[in-house]
Image (spheres, rainbow, N blue to C red):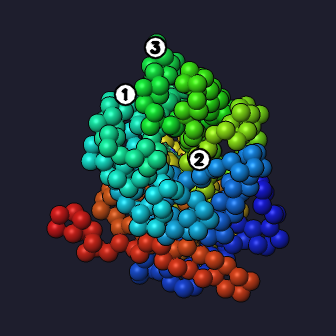
């Protein structure tokens, strides 16, 4: 494991998941006649990821260099998760008024909060400045809105930056590639005249002290991400040289560390931090404060969707297991299965690992469209009604951000901790009720 101790046999993430699934079934978090679906979140895995992130940067930063790690709230927009991470010293990167409200509800202090959305209204910008949270403007028009809001405010209370797209190129998933030539985010650094405009923008605004880059996400190779960071570091050096003073004082490096969806291997925070240190050594000599905004890498491995198998059938010779977990929880996997394959682990009616000779099976969800499959022709022990399936690595951008298709109810989310003879669950989000759904739907 990266920057954390190897787990003792039987206590690693897979063993904890097995314990949690059996306990969830035993304790009735999923039942035949009640809730057919639940989401489980391993507290230990989240804490381990947070520790690995801190250690990774501690190992490359200069003594006393300020580093603020924030969590991209979009990855798991659940207040108890933000609170858990805040307890690990991790703040919040927010990208909407709703996410900011969640961060505040979790008690995350303003000085640990960043607002990054690409479409902020004047009211959102004013609120952010009033609260004293860091804001990264996305584009010249947004910067002009800040020009109008800044006068009269104490400069020390402002933590304002500008997002730059280093245009270094994309990765294997187009929709996750933020640093392409035509990406909608930030100011395109390689566009004609952009570099000169950026330098001028900082020289003209003594209160503009940060540069922001988020150069990739799942599917983007680490060296491309690091190259994007280096480009923005070099821009900071150029601005500061032109200003004759350290005008850019903080570099926000974004998030984007990919997750391995094929194994229990934890995200490579240490390898990425070391790569950054090799690619842009000046980042870590103590002259700049740093901010990170990792999302998926902090929580994905901690999440498991647990669903009862309601029916099994065959069609055209294909075996199909019909479950309650589909596009409403696994939007990306269902609509872009080649980019977002998930591991499926099967369990028996008591929640114990299911064994048997694997045969290809489709794992279907409950949504009324044909493509609602979370796995295609997956070799698994033959499933029968009453068994369970789990969708692994779903702690980011899955059950925390459900889709309301078919008015399917949001499942309960339960954080768990394990001890040798017990699994303790606490409710992160209660299962949505039919009454709540009707009310939210205008009823
Ligand atoms: C600005 C910004 N920061 C951080 C993140 C988090 O990315 P990831 O979950 O891949 O770490 C995103 C994701 O979209 C983002 O847009």
- Report whether 119 appears left or right of 103: left
- Of 131 and 273, nearer the camera is 131
- Residue 368 in view in this figure: no
| Image quadrant in which you'd find residue 233 | top right
The answer to which quarter of the image holds residue 282 is: top right
The residue that label 1 is drawn on is 140
**Residue 154, horizontal then vertical, whole percent:** 40, 47
Q: Residue at x 83, y 71 (%)?
A: 8
The answer to whether the residues at label 1 and label 2 have Cβ atoms under 8 Å apart is no
Sequence order check, earlier mark of 1 and 3: 1
Callout 2 secondary element: strand
Spot occupied by residue 336 in the image (x, y as percentages of width and height): 48, 42
Circles 3 and 2 in contact, beta carbons < 8 Å? no
Residue linked to disc 2: 292
Indicate the position of residue 297 as horizontal and vertical percent values.
Answer: 62, 52
Residue 427 - label = none
Do the CB atoms of the residues marked 1 and 3 lie less than 8 Å apart?
no
Is 266 positioned to the left or the right of 140 in the image?
right
Query: Does the image show residue 427?
Result: yes
Secondary-structure class at tag 1:
helix
> Alpha carbon of mark 1 to alpha carbon of mark 2: how far?
23 Å
Precedes in sequence: disc 3 or disc 2: 3
């Amino acid at each position: 494991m990266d920057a954390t101790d190897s787990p003792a046999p039987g206590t690693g993430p897979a063993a904890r998941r097995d314990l949690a699934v059996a306990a969830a079934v035993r304790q009735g978090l999923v039942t035949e006649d009640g809730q057919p679906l639940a989401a489980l979140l391993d507290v230990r895995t989240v804490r381990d990821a947070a520790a690995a992130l801190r250690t990774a940067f501690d190992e490359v930063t200069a003594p006393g260099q300020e580093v603020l790690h924030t969590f991209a709230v979009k990855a798991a927009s659940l207040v108890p998760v933000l609170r858990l991470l805040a307890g690990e010293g991790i703040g919040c990167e927010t990208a909407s008024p709703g996410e900011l409200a969640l961060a505040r509800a979790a008690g995350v202090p303003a000085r640990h909060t960043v607002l990054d959305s690409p479409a902020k209204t004047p009211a959102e910008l004013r609120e952010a400045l009033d609260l004293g949270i860091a804001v990264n403007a996305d584009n010249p028009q947004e910067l002009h809105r800040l020009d109008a809001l800044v006068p009269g405010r104490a400069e020390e209370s402002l933590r304002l930056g500008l997002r730059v797209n280093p245009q270094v190129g994309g990765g294997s998933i187009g929709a996750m590639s933020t640093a392409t030539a035509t990406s909608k985010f930030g100011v395109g650094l390689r566009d004609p005249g952009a570099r000169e405009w950026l330098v001028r923008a900082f020289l003209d605004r003594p209160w503009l002290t940060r540069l922001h880059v988020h150069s990739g996400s799942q599917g983007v190779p680490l060296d491309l991400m690091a190259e994007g960071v280096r480009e923005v570091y070099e821009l900071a050096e150029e601005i500061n040289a032109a200003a004759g003073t350290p005008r850019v004082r903080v570099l926000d490096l974004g998030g984007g560390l990919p997750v391995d969806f094929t194994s229990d291997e934890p995200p490579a925070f240490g390898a990425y931090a070391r790569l950054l240190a090799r690619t842009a050594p000046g980042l870590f000599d103590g002259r700049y404060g740093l901010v990170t905004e990792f999302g998926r890498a902090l929580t994905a491995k901690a999440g498991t969707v647990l669903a009862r198998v309601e029916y099994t059938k065959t069609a055209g010779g294909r075996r199909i297991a019909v479950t309650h977990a589909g596009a409403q929880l696994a939007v990306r996997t269902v609509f872009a299965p080649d980019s977002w394959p998930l591991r499926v682990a099967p369990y028996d009616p008591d929640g114990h690992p299911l064994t048997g000779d694997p045969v290809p099976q489709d794992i279907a969800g409950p949504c009324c469209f044909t493509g609602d499959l979370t796995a295609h022709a997956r070799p698994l022990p033959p499933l029968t009604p009453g068994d369970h399936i789990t969708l692994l690595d779903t702690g980011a951008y899955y059950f925390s951000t459900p889709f309301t298709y078919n008015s399917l109810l949001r499942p309960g989310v339960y954080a768990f901790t394990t001890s040798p003879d017990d699994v303790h669950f606490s409710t992160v989000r209660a299962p949505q009720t039919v009454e709540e759904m009707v009310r939210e739907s205008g009823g």
